[in-house]
Amino acid sequence: MDDVQLWRAAVDLLNSRGESAEAEALKLADAALDSGDIDNFTRWKRVSRLIGEMQAKKPGDDIH
């Protein structure tokens, strides 16, 4: 997954799961790890971090 795909996956989970999006991404990462799929584990962990960053931002945070 490239960066754009990671962001899309994060936004899709946020839109479909709301506040539980990060937990859902972590569940998907765990499932991938359980099945031995390290690539998807890494991808879902990155998505979960992106979701955490997105949820932490407040409107107006980027204004200097």
Image (tube, rainbow, N blue to C red):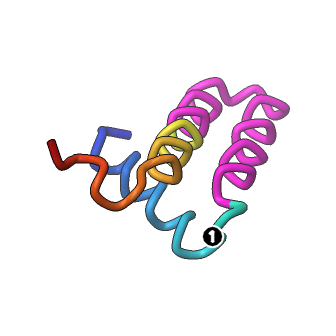
Residue 31 at what x, y percent from top left?
Answer: 80, 41
Residue 42 at what x, y percent from top left?
Answer: 57, 28
At a point 80% along the width and 34% down the height, the residue shown is: 35
Q: Is residue 19 left or right of residue 59?
A: right
Q: Quick check: 58 above or below 36? A: below
Please state the extent of the stretch shown in magenta in the rendering: 21-46
At a point 31% along the width and 38% down the height, the residue shown is: 2
The single residue placed furthest to the left in the displayed view is 64
Question: Picture quarter containing residue 37?
Answer: top right
Q: Is residue 24 left or right of residue 56?
A: right
Instruction: Classify mark 1: helix, strand or loop.
Output: helix
Q: Is residue 53 left or right of residue 45?
A: left
Residue situated in front as seen by the camera: 15 or 36: 15
Q: How many marks?
A: 1
At label 1, which amino acid type do we have? Gly
Identify the residue under disc 1. Answer: 18
- Which image quarter is the C terminus in? top left
Q: How crowded is the residue under tag 1: few (<14 C-alpha within 10 Å), some, or many (20+)?
A: few
Residue 47 at what x, y percent from top left?
Answer: 52, 43
Residue 63 at what x, y percent from top left?
Answer: 18, 49
- Which image quarter is the N terminus in? top left
The single residue placed furthest to the front in the displayed view is 64
Main secondary structure of the magenta stretch:
helix
